[in-house]
Amino acid sequence: MTSYAKAHTNIALIKYWGKKDPQLMLPMNNSISLTLDAFYTETWVSFQKELTSDRFILNETVQDTKQSKKVVKFLNEARAISKTKLFAEVKSINHVPTAAGLASSASGMAALAGATSLALGLPLDDISLSRLARHGSGSATRSIYGGFSEWQKGSDDATSYAVPLKEDLSDWDLAMIFILINDQPKKISSTAGMAHTVETSIFYPGWLKAIDGDLKDVRQAISEKNFTLLGETAERNALRMHATMLGANPPFTYLAPGTLTALDIVQKLREQGILGYCTMDAGPNVKVLVEKANVKTFLDALSVTFPKENLVVAFPGRGIELKEK
Ligand code: 2P0
């Protein structure tokens, strides 16, 4: 029997940046994200008596030991919980445009947590899936849900998981435009970047001081469907996260010249009353939160500078799907 899961990626509007406990994967702060339809991972898992080690096949290519490290670490934790000794075959297809340079750990680890739970007979309720996904990657906690969700930092393994804030967005016409600036693998992984920032940044205490206010504003914006408050808070929060890296020792940044060009274009449109707000993660790509009615205006303005094939429009996506196949 093979278990199947499909999970979409999510983009944080209030960022997760820093771990309080790297072993348990407990974050320093809550984060809030929007799950999107454009990028997703499909994963098939089967535990087999015949296997003498785990086997990970990504996009139809068998992965070596180094490439399989995160998946095997996750499977070891799942085996410990379910008290099985069987090894697994994991097949994943990442539906992320090639050369997108987008992280796939959120959708990838959420889909792996779902398919593994189904295969091992572990609990399948959203909170259990979110907790298990956390062991793979922090951002994966939020990909269990559609629409907006919040990862509550909690204080131990049992209390750190995401909850839905607004899963059904059929009454709110939101979209996100991905501007793909650079497809090179990043020099500093987000795991390493956040650890270095927590340890050395003189701005990190400021990040933590501001987070409750940002979280409160985004929760209020979601409950009131207040697009301006949502966007202004998200852009401010993203820039604050990137500022913490400039305050690290040695300093570093994921931003590139194209990132600032994109920010400038979006700001100029805002000055004309056409509202869009930017967010950036552990890489140079820019995601612009817009209302559906303005998607074309933004694409027209952005395509003057960026190749059309580097602009991808996404809409709110659904939560995880599980199937026995
Ligand atoms: C986020 N990022 O909230 C933040 C914003 C990047 C910047 O979560 O170490 O792959 O596996 O928990 O989840 C990317 O980091 O890191 C991330 P680990 P993850 O989306």
Image (cartoon, rainbow, N blue to C red):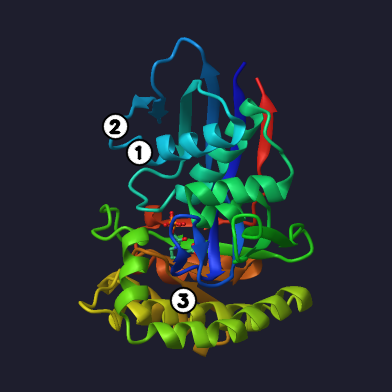
The kind of residue tagged 3 is Ala
Q: Position of residue 172 (x, y in %)?
A: 74, 66
| Residue 238: assigned label | 3
Element type at mark 3? helix
Q: At x 71% / y 38%, what residue is drawn?
A: 123
From this view, report whether residue 47 is shown above or below residue 128. above
Quadrant of residue 150 in the image?
bottom right
* Pick the front one: 147 or 159: 159
Instruction: Return the residue at label 1.
Output: 69
Q: Earlier in the sequence, mark 3 or mark 1?
A: 1
* Picture coordinates of residue 94, whole percent (x, y): 46, 38
Task: Identify the residue shown where x is 36% and y is 80%.
Answer: 244
Kindly report which numbered mark, 3 or 1, lies closer to the viewer in this rendering: 1
Is residue 115 at all visible to an observer of this figure? no
Q: Which residue is mark 2?
A: 65
Seen as rendered, the residue at the extreme top is 50
Which one is in front in this view, the residue at disc 2 or the one at disc 3? 2
